[in-house]
């Protein structure tokens, strides 16, 4: 997430946001009527997101699940729309052209500028999505993941995965080692 725009005299409605965003050269998330400019992502950030998205896409095959990367929006509520790094929806009714509302999996790759927002604000927001089964945070500067998974009773369970651990993905059903997720990533360079 980036910087909130406060120069507007009033808050935008969701329809005003969508109209503005459609023609904007810069992506913005929408929080409480305010625009939040999205910063560009690093090489490592993009490679981690693309690597996990490609593994999920392979696992999805021709099934009902669809995998999206950073340009697809997710609507949490009437006043919150985000651009997750990776998102999966398996609901055939979730067919919006530019916005999904029923994802089963959301993944964010931490950047220095977004880490606290991804771990706190977005966690709280994403947990409000009834269809969401897991929210996974991947670090870009080390082999490490934090997984928040909802059980069949609706209880959320956090789990940290590091070193040689495995990260389970609920949809499509897949388990990846951190070595697979971070293959080819050089942590020595910035």
Image (tube, rainbow, N blue to C red):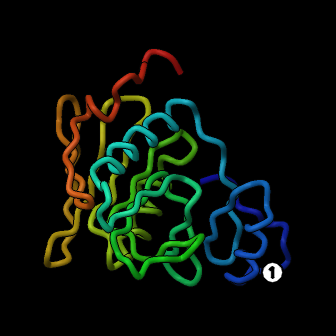
140, above or below 75, in the image: above
Residue 123 pos. (x, y %): 39, 63
**Disc 1, SS:** loop
Q: Is residue 84 left or right of residue 65?
A: right
Give the quarter of the image for residue 169. bottom left
Residue 38 pos. (x, y %): 66, 53
Residue 33 pos. (x, y %): 68, 77
111, above or below 157, in the image: above
Who's the residue at 38% across and 77% down the image?
Answer: 92
Give the quarter of the image for residue 158. bottom left
Who's the residue at 52% across and 38% down the image?
Answer: 46
Of 157 and 55, nearer the camera is: 55
Q: Is residue 57 left or right of residue 148?
A: right
Give the quarter of the image for residue 28. bottom right
Who's the residue at 76% across and 80% down the image?
Answer: 16
101, above or below 55, in the image: below
């Amino acid at each position: 997430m980036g910087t909130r725009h406060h120069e507007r005299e009033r808050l935008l409605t969701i329809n005003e946001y969508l109209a503005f965003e459609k023609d904007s050269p810069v992506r913005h998330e929408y929080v409480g009527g305010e625009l939040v400019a999205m910063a560009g992502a690093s090489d490592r950030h993009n490679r981690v997101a693309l690597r996990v998205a490609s593994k999920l896409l392979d696992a999805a095959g021709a099934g009902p699940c669809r995998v999206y990367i950073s340009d697809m929006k997710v609507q949490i509520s009437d006043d919150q729309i985000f651009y997750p790094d990776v998102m999966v929806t398996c609901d055939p009714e979730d067919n919006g052209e530019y916005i999904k509302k029923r994802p089963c999996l959301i993944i964010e790759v931490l950047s220095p500028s977004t880490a606290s927002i991804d771990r706190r604000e977005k966690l709280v927001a994403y947990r409000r999505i009834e269809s969401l089964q897991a929210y996974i945070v991947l670090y870009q500067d080390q082999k490490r993941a934090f997984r928040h998974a909802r059980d069949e009773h609706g209880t959320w369970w956090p789990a940290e995965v590091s070193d040689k651990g495995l990260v389970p993905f609920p949809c499509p059903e897949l388990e990846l080692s951190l070595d697979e997720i971070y293959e080819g990533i050089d942590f020595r360079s910035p």
